[in-house]
Image (cartoon, rainbow, N blue to C red):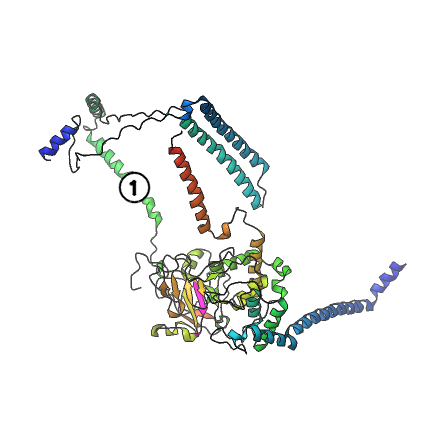
Amino acid sequence: MSDKSKSLAKAEDAEHDYSAGLAVIAPDAVKDPGMEPHRVRMTDKSEAHEKRAARQVAALFLFSIVSSAFALYAYFAFPIVEGSNASVRDNTLLLGVGAAFGMLAIGVGAVHWAKTLMPDAEVSEARHQTRGSEETRARAIEIIDLANKESGFSRRKLIRRSLYGALAFFPLPGLIVFADLGPNPGDSLKHTMWKKGTRLTRDPDGKPIKASDVTIGSVFHVIPEGLAELEHHKLEEKAKAAVLLVRVDPSILKESAERKDWSYDGIVAYSKICTHVGCPVALYEQQTHHLLCPCHQSTFDLTDACRVVFGPAARPLPQLPIAVDAEGYLVAQDDFNEPVGPSFWERSVNE
Amino acid sequence: MTKQKLNNARRSPFAAILVILAGLLISGGGYAVASDAVDTTSVAATSQATVDAGKKLFLANCASCHGSNAEGTNMGPSLIGVGAASVDFQVGTGRMPGQNSGPQLMKKPVQFTEEQTAQLAAYVASLAPGPSIPSEEWVGEAALAAGDTMKGGELFRINCAMCHNAVGAGGALTEGKFAPRLEGVEAKHIYEAMVIGPQNMPVFNDANLTPEDKRDIISYLKYVEANPSAGGEELGGLGPVAEGLFVWIFVLGGIVVITIWLGAKSN
């Protein structure tokens, strides 16, 4: 600290010994504009205005009484009738409106009262010093010393150290419950219910789908066989395994060599879970062959391995390799070859 | 005395035979009359005269885009095999004849009478087999009243709601295309749209949604139409967008007004 700033600080405020530190003390700081000139209200000047304002306040309080009474009346006059949604609406709406105006009118009345009738002279109230006086500070230290002497906190090591130990251990039971936030998802984000030979079935009834059922332009919302019968984690499994099945003219499919046998005669199956934040991508346009996600408008080209053509999604939708079994039903060749849905920390870029 | 006679007659061995005969006559005769009625209507719908009338209408109104034999041109697709359902939907909702090209064909005032629409449908249906107009069995008022609205609602949410909104209020697609509002659309037109997949709508054939499923879906839509939301004003049924707009403008606006009033000095 330079002598200059020290002396400056002293000069500005002799009472406090500020450390200038990094703060800049500007010599041309904004000046206190002082108090606005007082403006006299109509209610102060004219008795008629004053009386009218008083009547308005009282009227607002009376309105509050009427509203609260209306709420009570509505509760009994519009009872909730079993099985009638309209009666629930009427009951809650009228009760709520009455109670709301009952409270609002009190508030409005109180503010109006304060603004028009209570004294409105501007007053400046200086902030008092936050530091205690020397006597109170000395007295506080005296009390602490006395407490230390009487309790023997400094003298009795055994008690003091065992107390430290107890204080260190008591939060542990509180911390251990955080373990129940888990368990870690493990590799469950990387696998779905689909495996070799799982039949593609209709959502919601689980009826298997024949390849011949899927005519050109058709869209089937698909769940894996057995999902409809699950008793636990049905929604979790559905959220990963939901698939959209579409048939297009095989000649317009642009398929890479490695995915050549993933479709069946123009029938393709893609994960319905958007790779952006996991909304169900299910708006299929039959003529453009685009799949649109309703949440953030990510658009995927179904004929081109669900490449992202628009929107925030970072990856194409994962494709489910499909085949047809001996009875003509569509089955999965395998699980998806990458995790479905949005990115997560443990997802490697190459997956 | 007559009662005694009747009782004796009932015990006669011929009584059973007579009862069976009478039953057969009534049910068989009734069936014959009923199937007669069905036959005559179907004959009427596909008679050569109807097809010819349809062809005339087609040549005058449709052939410039769809070709004089409905084989399609670069202005409009081939109609061979699209079936009567497609014609009834496109012409019956006023989408055809199309008036201007745009992102999608719009619903317009219907240009043809019901009879003319039926003639056109009969002509296109005569070209090649295709989906037919749904019968009263699935889209009649009695059928819809018997539909399972709960199941229909579930199927609608799985198959339709992502484009058409959960209560059929419609929604936007890409580049100016949209899924239309389903309120007030005739049951048979909804059924036909599911079968044929008009424009960008996908096809929902009978293997995907059975006729019962389609009927349940329409029942659900008609139920939603007939039973307004118990929660109060629907704001178009568009959900958070319309509701959010209302809250931002009116509720937040009200809070701003109150705040200004609180801070202002009284005069």
Q: Which residue is mark 1?
A: A172
Badge 1: residue crowd in 10 Å (few <14, some 14–19, many ≥20): few
The answer to whether residue B145 is visible is: yes
Horizontal side, residue B187 vs residue A115: left or right = right
Residue A48 in the image: state x and y as whole percent: 46, 23
Q: Nearer the viewer, residue A322 or B175?
A: B175
**Does the magenta-highlighted stretch encompass residue A57?**
no
Q: Which residues are magenta?
A: A243-249
- Secondary structure mainly formed by the magenta segment: strand
Q: Residue furthest left?
A: A3
Figure quadrant of the C terminus of chain A = bottom left
Residue A204 in the image: state x and y as whole percent: 50, 60
Callout 1: SS: helix
Residue A265 in the image: state x and y as whole percent: 44, 75
Relative to A321, is A45 above or below? above
**Does the magenta-highlighted stretch encompass residue A247?**
yes
Figure quadrant of the N terminus of chain A = top left
Amino acid marked by disc 1: Leu
Horizontal side, residue A251 vs residue B193: left or right = left
* Chain letter of the residue beneath label 1 in the structure image: A
